Image: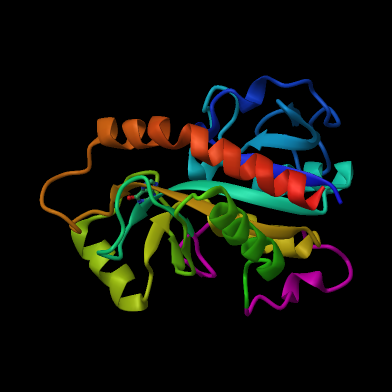
Amino acid sequence: MSYAVIGGTSLEGWGSGAVVGPAPPNRYGRPSALLRQIPGHASAVFLNRHGARHEYLPHEINYRANLWALKELGVTHAIAVFAVGGIESGFSVGDFVVPDQLIDYTYGREMTFRLPDSRAHIDFTYPFDRDLSANIVATAARLGIDIVEGGVYGATQGPRLETAAEVSRLARDGCTLVGMTAAPEAPLAREADIAYAPLCVVVNPAAGVVDGQISHDEMSAAVERTQAPLKALLGAVIESEG
Ligand code: HPA
């Protein structure tokens, strides 16, 4: 088994390991960043979906080139880390959540590799790999890290955050979390036969869930505060599966 962690700003420092990936671009274009060894976990690779200098906004990411680069490297399992807004009232900033469902509100993004064998019509009833998701939850429990199992990730187009009314609609649809990047990343992983599971970090209450505006300082503080347990959890999952 070969592991990848796809992350963004929430995993600072993991973009500094040795380069392992094929040099971009591949047949779908240029991946967001070079694939790098994860410090302390040499068998796994890290891909920063927003780019090494955060140059790609969610709608600008070349998700196909990213997933294809992992596929070409022989990656079989990918843990996708997301900073998200919490919609469900029980969530606190800093919570870890492994959602089990996805609603895609994005548009205009390249959603399929268009492989010749009809793989565009993948079964997507359960959008995330259930064994890998279960392992993330079990590993968190073993390490004494609180984690919420299950939930619905609403993928919005961004790059702006949502209005309060948009978040009310997401809540009525059943979304418990909101982020901007799980689609089309998750369906492309399924097409590429990569077992893919999400690990979300709640960095703010979604718009209108609490009074007031969303604070970028609060989001950054949550990212900072969760770095150590997040990296410990990811490392332990990689070691347990490797
Ligand atoms: N909305 C969408 N994406 C996000 C949010 C949010 O509130 N927080 C972090 N990513």
Q: Nearer the viewer, residue 235 or 44?
A: 235
Q: Which residues are magenta?
A: 98-125
Q: Is residue 162 left or right of residue 128?
A: left
Residue at image coords 50%, 47%? 82
Q: Is residue 162 visible?
A: yes
Residue at image coords 87%, 41%? 73
Majority secondary structure of the magenta segment? loop
Residue 222, located in which quarter of the rendered image?
top left
Q: Nearer the viewer, residue 29 or 44?
A: 44
Q: Is residue 31 visible?
A: no
Residue 126 is situated, as x and y percent measured from the top left of the image, at: 62, 76
Q: Name the residue furthest left.
A: 211
Q: Is residue 35 left or right of residue 199?
A: right
Identify whether 233 is placed above or below 40. Answer: below
Residue 102 is situated, as x and y percent measured from the top left of the image, at: 51, 68
Residue 134 is situated, as x and y percent measured from the top left of the image, at: 63, 65
113 is within the stretch colored magenta: yes
Residue 215 is situated, as x and y percent measured from the top left of the image, at: 23, 37
8 is within the stretch colored magenta: no
